[in-house]
Image (cartoon, rainbow, N blue to C red):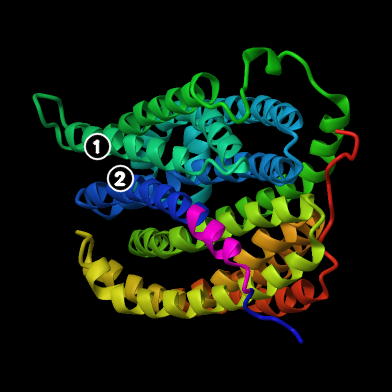
Amino acid sequence: MTVWLTKDKSFYRDLVALAIPIALQNMITFAVNFADNLMIGSLGDAAVSGVYVGGQMQTVLQMFVGGIDGAVLVLAAQYWGKKDTASIRKVVSIGTRLSILVGIVMTLLVELFPAQIIGVFSASSGVLREGVSYLTIVGFSYLFFSVAQIMITSMRSVETAKVGMYISFMTLAVNVSLNYILIFGKLGMLAMGVRGAAVATLISRIFEMLAGTGYVFFVDRKLDMKYRDFLHTDRELLKDFVKYGLPIIGGNVVWSVNMLANTKIMGFYSEEVLAAVSITGMMNNLVYVGMTGMSAAVGIITGKTVGAGKYELMKEYARTVQVIFLFVGIFSGLLVRGLRDPFISLYSVSEAARIVSGQFINVLSFTIIGTCYQAACLAGLVKAGGDISFVFRNDTVFVFLVVIPSAVLSYYLGMPAWFVFLCLKCDQILKCFVAVVKINRFNWMKNLTRQEA
């Protein structure tokens, strides 16, 4: 008899214990971005659009670093299932060095070519002016962000999820306080507008990095990381990192291309439409933070269970996850629809931007159902379970053969902005059909650890 809800109480206990701090950390990170977005929103459509476009390079950075984080988490979680902390330290060392390299490269790009980068997404002089002002300052935060994320991921991999939550909470306090002071010129400071938001972000990222590295090196005792761990590279584990990490990084690169294409396509419209995209993105992130916390928790449990070789138990967990995230998706869709008007009213934008935002959020209330199911299951089960390349191939097919072509075609056919937005989100529903088949074949459970480790 097929069991669709596991009776193993430890699964639910671990899911809640891991999901809550990760979700809260994500919520705090969202609050940081939301505070930026809301305060800048009082400066008008051009400022909102400029910061949104300028923030696309942070999205690209997050995709690259997120790919490295993903490789660290998948490998480290499986080694954690075997309690092999020595190998985890080596994996974290490899991931840290790669993240530093990515952070440096991204900083150089935005400092050398800020106007060209903003100009790719919008021809508006107002958006270009505000975007460049923001990007040239916030670009210096990329290196600090890259290191901080790896430190937090290393703790998640050994089920110390609360650390990231505490660090993010402190980062939020620093960021929001500085936003208020620097954007509007409080406490005797000059009003800096979008440049003030960028400076606040830079300072808060430095604080986040110092807090993360400080905990990992001086407080944590699970991994017992030392600076000497970064002086040597295990060649065998480096091969594993490249083998299993490249599909994750590749998948994130594909997704960053998709996000940049979204911005470019919607940038063909007016400043009001870009402002609406920014507002809708904030709404999406608001609902998404809880789901990603649960998804990350599922990934850690999956990696640990597969790493320990408990395949039959993992099948039971996988069926339970599907049921949970289907209902999470339905609840999220209803929540998005119910919060639409109150959320939009928080922004001081034009009436045209408000109308378009409402249309976009209506689309989101439907597609978020699919997002919660397929994204959580494919990342939390399939990717964390070891079949990393499948998720990469799946995303590549949908982005380049479905999402971008349909959106571009719809734009040139003169379809309204909300329909083009629907095309950009259509894969969130279509991937569900792929996910159902893939997950229930159970051919994604693969132990990636080295037996002699």
Task: Pinpoint residue 149: horizontal percent, then vertical percent.
Answer: 54, 36
Q: Which residue is mark 2?
A: 36
Q: Nearer the viewer, residue 301 or 254?
A: 301
Secondary element under disc 2, as helix, strand or loop, is: helix
Q: Residue at x 27, y 37 (%)?
A: 173
Label 1 neighbour load within 10 Å: few <14, some 14-19, many 20+: many
- The quarter of the rendered structure image containing the N terminus is bottom right
Left or right of 179 in this view: 125: right
Badge 2 amino acid: Asp
Q: Could you give the CA–CA distance between mark 1 and mark 2, rounded to whole angstroms?
A: 7 Å
Q: Quadrant of residue 319?
A: bottom right
Task: Pinpoint residue 247: horizontal percent, then vertical percent.
Answer: 78, 49
The residue range painted magenta reads: 7-17
Left or right of 368 in this view: 97: right
- Label pair 1/2, CB-CB below 8 angstroms: yes
Q: Nearer the viewer, residue 375 or 48?
A: 375
Left or right of 329 in this view: 6: right
| Residue 50 seen in render | no
Q: Quadrant of residue 204?
A: top left
Q: Residue at x 84, y 38 (%)?
A: 240
Q: Which residue is mark 1?
A: 179
